Amino acid sequence: MLDQLKEGLRNAIKKLIYSDIVNEKAVKEFIRDVQRALLQADVNVKIVLEVTSKIEKEALKSDIPAGLSKRDYIINLLYNELVKILGTESKIEFPRNICNTILLVGIQGSGKTTFAAKLGKYLQKDGYKVGVVCADTFRPGAYDQLKTMCERGKVDVFGMPNEKKSIKIAIEGKKHFESTKNIVIVDTAGRHKEERELIEEMKEINSKINPQLVLLVIDGTIGQQSFTQAKAFHDATPIGGIVITKLDGAAKGGGAIAAAASTQAKILFISTGEGLDDIERFVPERFVSRLLGLGDVKAILERVKQAEIEPDESRVRRLMSGKMTIDDLYEQLSQLKKFGSIKKLLELIPGMPELSDKIDADKLEERLEKWRFVIQSMTKEERQNPELLNASRIKRIAIGSGVNEKEIKEMIKQYNDMKVVMKRTKGKFLRGFAR
Ligand SMILES: Nc1nc2c(ncn2[C@@H]2O[C@H](COP(=O)(O)OP(=O)(O)OP(=O)(O)O)[C@@H](O)[C@H]2O)c(=O)[nH]1
Ligand SMILES: [Mg+2]
């Protein structure tokens, strides 16, 4: 879905993560990359400039919240601004004790019929009893198309192939399902090529069948033109939501979503393929996380919180003065273990899903495991005083831990390096790693 936009934004992030220092030049380049990606997806120029100038202004400020790296801060800004332009999540719930009607409208070929079947299946999975009505008297074979798709999804269909008045079919369909269903989805004809006519007809059907929800189905391939459609619709009727279809492979899909959202109308669903299960609720946060490859952002925050490292006073002082004992190191490694498997953690870190090919997380985890075995084979004195570790002691530890001597020597060297880093960063090293 939206592969081009995804790639553009992820490349911008990747470049930022790999840059040696995050100075003004790097920020400006990041902003340019983001602008390019959004414009290519047909996001409206005004929206693009608004979003990126906000990010740029914030990113160039010197006071970044304590404990955050500049890179994290900037990625977070991008995430927040993108979520903001896409609006808020809206709940869709229907009372189960009445028969609710959902009316689908949209111009020719926008994907109404396909969506009617998908929505039927989706709501049925959610526990509703659903019937779908074919009120399209314009398109030849409309009923057969809908019937075939609904049958595949095991959703009941109603139609009157010989009836010419769509309002009549809608009314009969409602009656037909009234006593057995709690949701009736009405698929309408898409003979309209422009919004004005469509809205006139929608108003008429609306007044006669009184639906609980009118959904406007918009073809995502039209990009920012979805603005006029969504706006006209939203101005004409206070109820309603929007469905954006064909987001699979639609180069302009990002622009279509941003434009529709900027009308204040709610996007309720998106459709990402011709299959019956290619439907999803539109949740701006989730959508942007996926777009940027941030994994599940909420999950990261929770894990970081759970794993807040709370070393005791004396340990902190030792770490800060560079006098980290191996016991301290062991304690820190155990803290890292709280994150669960390192591979899973890497997948949750911004930018990491993209980079994880390059990092062999299994190896890293294996290495930490070995480290633990080695530490467990040391005596208490050795752990307090690593300088004691001479050749004969290392030989003994190798036998006890099953890790060869060369590797142990390497570990000791790493420990010494880490001690230097700890001293320099005043113990923040592991916290940084955790983030
Ligand atoms: N790739 C892709 N194709 C879709 C999607 N939704 C619908 N289509 C295709 O778009 C075409 C039109 O879909 P329909 O559901 O018939 O559209 P409609 O709005 O009912 O059309 P009319 O009734 O003629 O107005 C069909 O070929 C569908 O298979 C989608 O999310 N992705
Ligand atoms: Mg149709």
Image: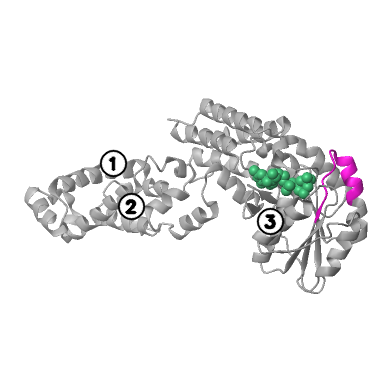
N-terminal of the pair, mark 2 or mark 1, is 2
Q: Is residue 353 above or below residue 251?
A: below
The residue where tag 2 is placed is 317
Judge whether residue 386 can be spotted in this image: yes
Residue at image coords 90%, 54%: 164
Give the CA separation, mark 2 to mark 1: 14 Å
Q: Quadrant of residue 98?
A: bottom right
Q: Is residue 424 above or below residue 368?
A: above
N-terminal of the pair, mark 3 or mark 1, is 3
Question: What is the three-letter code of the residue carrying label 1?
Answer: Val
User: Element under label 2?
Assistant: helix
At label 1, counting other C-alpha atoms closer than 10 Å, the crowd grade (few under 14, some 14-19, many 20 or more) is some
Q: Percent from the top left, x then y, of residue 410?
A: 19, 44
Q: Quadrant of residue 352?
A: top left
Mark 3–mark 1 CB contact (< 8 Å): no
Residue at image coords 69%, 54%: 89
Q: Is residue 81 above or below residue 317?
A: above
Give the CA separation, mark 3 to mark 2: 68 Å
Q: Percent from the top left, x then y, of residue 309?
A: 40, 57
Question: What is the three-letter code of the residue carrying label 2?
Answer: Arg
Q: Quadrant of residue 86?
A: top right
Q: Is residue 60 magenta?
A: no
Residue reaching furthest to the top:
25
The residue where tag 3 is placed is 149
Give the CA separation, mark 3 to mark 1: 65 Å
The residue where tag 1 is placed is 420
Which residue range is magenta in the image?
A: 187-202
Residue reaching furthest to the front:
162
Q: Percent from the top left, x then y, of residue 111?
A: 73, 47
The CB of the residue at mark 1 lies under 8 Å from ligand 1:
no
Which quadrant holds the N terminus?
A: top right
